[in-house]
Amino acid sequence: MAETILVTGAGGYIGSNAAEYFAKKGYRVVGTIHRHVAERFARLGATSVKTDLTDPKSVSVLFGKRVDYVVHIAARASDVGRDEWFREANYEAVKRLASAAMEHGVKRFVYLSTSDVYGLHDFHGECEDELQFDEASSNPYPKYKILSEKWLKESVPPEKFACVRPCVVYGRGDTSITPRTIAYLKNSPIVFHFGKWRGKNRWPLAHVENVCRVLHAAMVLPQAGGKGVTVLDSKRTTLSEYYHEIARRFLDGKHLRECTLPMSVIRPVAWLSTMLSGNRTSPLFDPTLYSLDTVAHNLDFSNRRMIQWLAAAGLDEA
């Protein structure tokens, strides 16, 4: 009998890709849906459960039948929004779901975190054992991802959980970074870079297929228990190269003019964007303080552990 995987957030971008991936691998997939359902998941014919993971009563019904693994992807992902929104969706819901999974004998709880837990500053190829959480982060997105990872480490046996930390996820069905970049390139006559890197900093891309494969490895490998892994494509892409590739693919090869401005010029604009977007689920305009720090730094991590885990699981990098 096929093992059952509960994939939360299966109606979304990463979740629907993961659900399809595991279904193709022969697992029985049960996916939680909150509001919208990606066409990819709808086509699967997999079991779906409409639920709100912030509601304690909703969580208990997910384990009415046997569940072998939980891959927890559902989250609030944005660079703006109220702190309490993120706390409930990205922390309290994690504790609730992981506790229920342990009570029902789930073999492993795989948590989709983010590389943003390391902070937004310049990196130079550090691996997971050399990286530390950015405890001083004030943005609620990484803040509650960090707290969730720490709670799992303190509250769940190490062999029962693993954390997957993707960088900037892109690929088929992307509803986040690619559309946002296309809109920026369409509306701006000049591509602006900020700070010392002048667009030569690494833009840390993680193809969604690689994210799915690493989720699989984190689920089945004994050595993954209690560990975190960064998901980052091996090909090094600079921010400038990324913009040019998006223009080539989606804007009929639009010629891009580039200009670099000092951070002091744009930071007041980013501060205003962040303040005006505090009660929104998406920024009123770009850049926010958080996205400014993202594009202005060299987010260059090691993906050695990712490659090792994929090899150990008999998988290749996409």
Image (cartoon, rainbow, N blue to C red):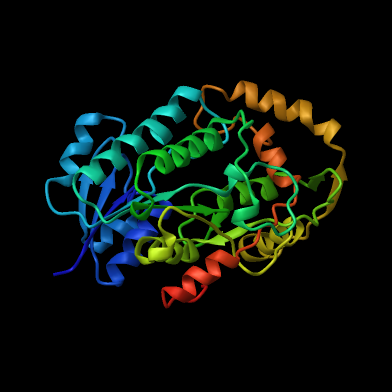
Q: Residue at x 71, y 46 (%)?
A: 295
Q: Looking at the picture, how far across and down is residue 269, in whole percent?
A: 75, 28
Q: Residue at x 60, y 41 (%)?
A: 133
Is residue 213 positioned above or below 170 on the image?
below
Could you tell whether 296 is left or right of 85 in the image? right
Q: Residue at x 36, y 61 (%)?
A: 219
Q: Nearer the viewer, residue 178 or 70?
A: 70
Q: Quadrant of residue 45?
A: bottom left
Q: Nearer the viewer, residue 171 or 196?
A: 196
Q: Looking at the picture, how far across and down is residue 56, in whole percent?
A: 24, 30
| Residue 190 visible in image | no
Q: Nearer the viewer, residue 56 or 45?
A: 56
Is residue 51 positioned above or below 88 on the image?
below
Q: Looking at the picture, how far across and down is residue 150, in whole percent?
A: 47, 39
Could you tell whether 184 is left or right of 201 in the image? left
Q: Quadrant of residue 220?
A: bottom left
Q: How many marks?
A: 0
Could you tell whether 141 is left or right of 57 in the image? right
| Residue 130 visible in image | yes
Q: Nearer the viewer, residue 249 or 119?
A: 119
Q: Looking at the picture, how far across and down is residue 226, in whole percent?
A: 43, 52
Q: Residue at x 18, y 68 (%)?
A: 2
- Location of the N terminus (image quadrant): bottom left
